Image: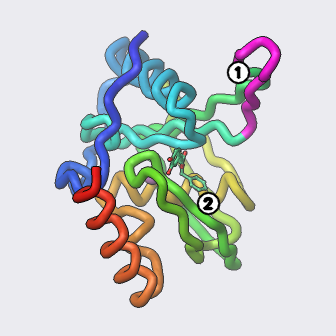
Amino acid sequence: MATLDILTYPNPILRHKSTAVEEFDSDLKETVANMLETMYAAPGIGLAAIQVGIKKRIIVIDIEYEFDDETNEITNKNPRVFINPEIVSKEGEILYQEGCLSVPQFYEEVKRAGKVCVEYFDVEGKKHSIEAEGLLAVALQHEIDHLEGRLFIERLSFIKAKQAKKKLKKQSIDE
Ligand code: QAP
Ligand code: CO
């Protein structure tokens, strides 16, 4: 296993549309394992393959794990893997303060569907569907956006998007 480098805004690769996984082989399992390791190391709660430069429709999410300050170890891991995910229905609304490992140090509220039904495959190629609400629904929509080359800063209101671009531009000059 290895941690991978995370691409950051404004890297144009983050704009690419990812393509479907067709072979559920050992390469896929290795990619998933590396993505999980990268997410936990960051630390983050979600990661799409394109964020580590892999143009495949693969997402990992863990919204449950905690960090134990005494042992310096991650506990209560609940890694979720979604291959070729598809939102088949959405309803309601949720406003959530989002961040992104590819847009470090920047957080802003985004409005999304409050509840989604997502069909996906596991690493073995078996099909599943999940109904998600709250944080998991937000995470799924945020990560599925990455597969389409879309970042959460494009989902902000026009005025907030402008402020965000200005701030991010300044950050990349300053650093
Ligand atoms: C996407 O985001 C997400 O700026 C995952 O300096 C966002 O893991 C899912 C992070 C909101 C659900 C709700 C961001 C870490 C992590 C930063 C992340 C940073 C360090 C973001
Ligand atoms: Co993101």
Label 1: how many Cα within 10 Å (few below 14, some 14–19, many 20+): few
Question: Residue at coordinates 25% horizontally, 37% vertically from top-left?
Answer: 53
Q: Which mark sits nearer the N-terminus, 2 or 1?
A: 1
Foreground residue among 49 and 90: 49
The x, y position of residue 123, in whole percent, is 48, 25
Residue 20 in view in this figure: no
**Residue 103 occupies quadrant:** bottom left
Question: Residue at coordinates 39% horizontally, 80% vertically from top-left?
Answer: 163
Three-letter amino acid code of the residue under disc 2:
Val
Residue designated by label 1: 74
Residue designated by label 2: 138
Q: Which residues are magenta?
A: 64-74
Count of marks placed on residues: 2
The x, y position of residue 140, in whole percent, is 56, 53
Above or below residue 167? Residue 68 is above
**Residue 110 occupies quadrant:** bottom right
Foreground residue among 72 and 174: 174
Drawn side of residue 63 relative to residue 122, left or right: right
The x, y position of residue 132, in whole percent, is 70, 55
Above or below residue 7? Residue 69 is above
Three-letter amino acid code of the residue under disc 1:
Ile
Residue 11 in view in this figure: yes
At numbered mark 2, what does the secondary structure look like: helix, strand or loop?
A: helix
